[in-house]
Amino acid sequence: KTGTILTASPHPDAEKLLVLSVSCGDVDENDDTTSTPRTVVAGLAGVCTPEDLVGKRTLVICNLKLAKMWGIESTVMMLVAVALEDAKIQLVELPVRIEDGELIYFEGVKPFDFGEGGVVGGGGLPMLKSKKAVKVWDRVKAWF
């Protein structure tokens, strides 16, 4: 999904981590308003400053198992890219005209109808969580 970084601050207990709040376009089913932003704990402290991140529009993965990182629960993951020229990690930035919560697809790849709950054929988007011998890509590559 697309999201906007609303706040960013250093993690209180880990110097390489930042704690971000990200608007992911979630809607509260009870009153049709945007709900509370999601929290991201990201290892970006050595890459950019919190001030550089606030207001940036980026890509986030929202259907992951919640993870506690140094005591703070992270509910989404941000996507970053590595520049080929200098191997520098960069935030994937999006144009302002894309609203928070938009689903992003690869050009030429047909979107799937995940149906009820998001699983192909119905049941919902699967929770992408690690299993000892199974990598996430091995579990989802069949979708592409």
Image (cartoon, helix red, strand yellow):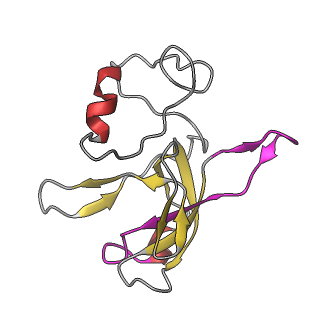
- The picture quadrant where one finds residue 15 is bottom left
- The picture quadrant where one finds residue 124 is top right
The residue lying at 55 percent from left, 56 percent from top is 75
- The picture quadrant where one finds residue 139 is top left
The residue lying at 35 percent from left, 24 percent from top is 107
| 19 in relation to 123, above or below | below
Looking at the image, can residue 115 be seen? yes
State the residue in front, 60 or 53.
60
The residue lying at 27 percent from left, 41 percent from top is 135
Q: Position of residue 81 (x, y in %)?
A: 28, 53
In the image, taking residue 44 as reference, residue 63 lies left or right, namely right
* 108 falls in the magenta region: no
- Direction right: furthest residue: 31
Q: Position of residue 130 (x, y in %)?
A: 35, 47
Looking at the image, can residue 144 be seen? no
Q: Position of residue 63 (x, y in %)?
A: 51, 42
Residue range highlighted in magenta: 25-49
- Direction left: furthest residue: 85
In the image, taking residue 77 as reference, residue 81 lies left or right, namely left
| 125 in relation to 25, above or below | above
Q: Position of residue 141 (x, y in %)?
A: 29, 27
